[in-house]
Amino acid sequence: MKPLFNNVIIKPVKEDKKTESGIVLPETADKKKQSKGTVIAVGPGKVTDQGNLISMSVKQGDLVLFKEPWSDDNKIKNENGEEEFVVSEDDILAIIE
């Protein structure tokens, strides 16, 4: 699957969330969901009103921190049945190096 415009397909990385004292927190403990994920595919970029293409800042294989969409409309299942998200590049907060 190839996303269009400045959209990105991200496969979330599941990780346990623990406090410093070792208590495991459930996913429902987060008010604003931010997740780590691996970029699976990227679109060509955003086109300005003048017709110029702004290239993407992320590339396939990058580990990123992103805002999970609040809607299920952005969730897809890949051919292996695993959940992935289609998000705008604007929803990516950072590239983790």
Image: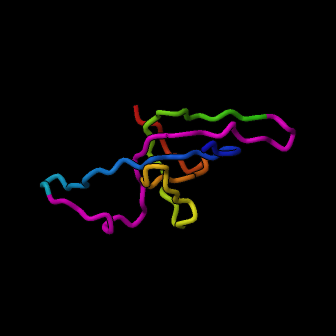
Which of the 4 quarters of the picture holds residue 42? top right
Residue 25 image point, x, y percent:
23, 62
Q: Residue at x 47, y 33 (%)?
A: 61
Q: Is residue 14 above or below residue 47?
A: below
In the rendered image, the vertical position of residue 82 relative to residue 71, given as above or below: above
Rendering quarter of residue 27: bottom left
Q: Residue 71, percent across and down?
A: 54, 67
Q: How many marks?
A: 0
Residue at (78%, 41%) from the top-left corner? Answer: 47
Q: Residue furthest left?
A: 21
Residue 63 point in image, percent of width and height? 43, 37
Q: What segment carries the magenta color?
A: 23-52
| Left or right, 24 with reference to 55 | left
Nearer to the camera, 39 or 19:
39
Q: Quadrant of the N terminus?
A: top right
Q: Quadrant of residue 45?
A: top right
Is 50 a magenta residue? yes
In the image, farthest residue toward the front: 79
Is residue 68 found inside the magenta-colored segment of the image?
no
Q: Residue at x 80, y 41 (%)?
A: 48
Depth check: give the residue in front, 14 or 56.
Answer: 14
Viewer-nearest residue: 6 or 3:
3
Q: Quadrant of the C terminus?
A: top left
x and y percentages locating residue 36 in the rendered image? 40, 47
